[in-house]
Image (cartoon, grey):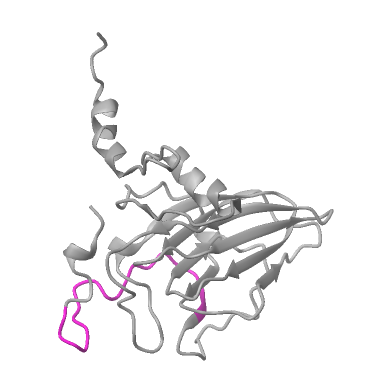
Amino acid sequence: MKSLTKQNILLIPLLIFTSCNSPDYTLSAINTAELAVDARCSMDGPKDPQVLPKWAPLPLALPDSCLKGIEINDQAFATPLTFNSLDPLGSQDRTLELDYATYLAPNNMKITGVNADGSTYLLFNSCVLQTWLLGNPSTTYPRVRPCEGSIRDFRLHLKGGTTALIFEPTSDSPYYIRVLGLCDFDLSSVPVTPTRPATLRLTTDRSTSPLEGTTLPNGKEACPESANIQ
């Protein structure tokens, strides 16, 4: 009988979070990549939520010179957001850093890359991931980055020669997304200071949530430990 390695011992308790009718997701970089482009999102019919605890932070992938990106917080869009590459030949090949929160209900969020020949590929397609046990604690204007316990991080492969990125947040329930590494794209249409109650804004750093350790107007703790998925 083989002895258990330290890695195997660590993975055993994680398997209890895998739904019996879902793919076998353990918490590794490989499986977060599978969650980033979830095959179930292309299937018809209802889908069970994927409820996973926060995994260990993934390695940083970007130099400080390419941290430009966007934050979207509870923003609904009549049409998808499209950002074109600054170079007509497209982007450099790089890894994007994405942070995502859905709180109580999964959201349908899709990010598509467009190649020079017009073909497309998926960088992110999530429709079943639930990340917290409460709603969005950022209820005042402007929306801010939510509690760190509600956020899941991903690393997305941006293919060299990508001429456009299309963001399609299509769900009505609250969500948050931050994507860094968009230095090859024209973000001039993205406001630095948001003009709506919900938030679309330009960002250039890896700042954490300002809600940590604070109290909401109703007197409750903004980021209670009890809301984190264990």
Q: Residue furthest left?
A: 219
In the image, what residue occupies the spot 45% across and 56% down? 128
Image point (50%, 86%), residue name: 194
Q: Position of residue 158 (x, y in %)?
A: 63, 52
Main SS class of the magenta portion in the image: loop
Does residue 10 lie above or below 146 as drawn?
above
Verify whether residue 137 appears in magenta: no
Q: Quadrant of residue 66?
A: bottom right
Quarter of the figure that contains the N terminus = top left
User: Of 74 and 142, which appears nearest the observer?
Assistant: 74
In this picture, residue 151 sits left or right of residue 40: left
Give residue 153's position: percent from left, percent from top: 42, 55
Q: In percent of the image, x 61 and y 60: which residue is there?
A: 111
Q: Which segment did they paint magenta?
A: 200-220
Image position of 25 with respect to 205: above or below = above
> On the image, which quarter does residue 226 sit in?
bottom left
Single out the residue that lies furthest toward the right: 117
How far from the left and from the top, in percent, is residue 74? Answer: 46, 77
184 in relation to 43, above or below = below
Can residue 38 be seen here? The reply is no
